[in-house]
Image: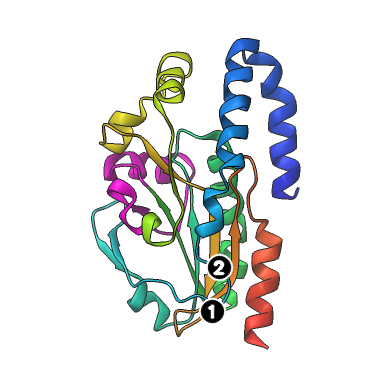
Amino acid sequence: MALFEEIAKFQKEMMPKIPQDVLQTMQKTSAEIISKNLHHGALKSGDTIPAFTLPDATGAPVSSDQLLKSGLLVISFYRGGWCPYCNLELKALQSALLKIKTLKANLIVISPELQDHARVTQEENSLEYPVLSDVDNSVAKQFGLVYELGEEMTELFKHTFNWDLQSINGAQKVELPFPATYIVNQEGVVKYAFVDADYTQRAEPDKIIEVLRSCGD
């Protein structure tokens, strides 16, 4: 099943279970974020990514420069392991991991979660690729992906879904990255960029595989 189909199935099952007032607030806030077009400033195809080093879920440093020495690099920014859409994406990427590696590419995923929470995300989703902790969204900001969630949604998430993002991210002001996936060549140049202000939209693993194959031609 394609990722978009998994997402549609999840929405069909879960949306009726969310209180109407909560759902309306979430939809209103999402529409406001999308309308600001903040994601239009994100890195795009042809841009060069900034070099970065971030800790993985065990605390070991992971360097983009080192990964690029061995081949192409797939980078996916996600909001956090608390987000069900993110978990669907992470699992879909895990299912595609063997194909990604066969095409001589590395895969990493990045979120603002503190390291302990990144480890839980990795363990609960049985992920075999590096899950990196980008505290304060330092790298996501360099990619032009960050927006502020706002107090209303921060409190709604905390009290309705028990998602305490201030604790999970270790920050008083909750900032999140837009869902984004990049494929980068060994020179650090972006060959494919997927960025969407709508948190329910994600890059399809099949598209990632297609681009990786074209990069190898």
**Residue 155 seen from this side:** yes
Q: CA distance from mark 2 to mark 1?
A: 22 Å
For this view, does 85 lie left or right of residue 117?
Answer: right
The residue carrying pointer 1 sits among few (fewer than 14), some (14 to 19) or many (20 or more) residues within 10 Å by Cα, namely some
Where's residue 137, x and y in %? 34, 50
Badge 2: how crowded within 10 Å, few (<14), some, or many (20+)?
some
Please state the horizontal and vertical placement of residue 166, each as a whole percent of the image: 31, 30
In the rendered image, which quarter is residue 168 located in?
top left
- Is disc 1 placed on a helix, strand or loop? loop
Range of the magenta residues?
112-139
Name the residue beneath numbered marker 1.
Answer: 104
User: What residue is disc 2 on?
Assistant: 44
Given the current orientation, which residue lies at the most extreme front position? 36
170 drawn magenta: no
Q: Indicate the amino acid at tag 1.
A: Lys
| N-terminal label among 2 and 1 | 2
Rendered view: 91 above or below 11: below
Left/right placement of residue 26 relative to residue 54 reads: right
- Report the front residue among 172 and 54: 172
Helix, strand or loop at mark 2? loop
Query: Quick check: 11 left or right of 82?
Result: right
Amino acid at the residue labelled 2:
Lys
Across and down, in percent, residue 129 comes to 44, 59
Tell me the mark number nearer the camera, choosing from 2 and 1: 2
Residue at point 44%, 57% (across, down): 144
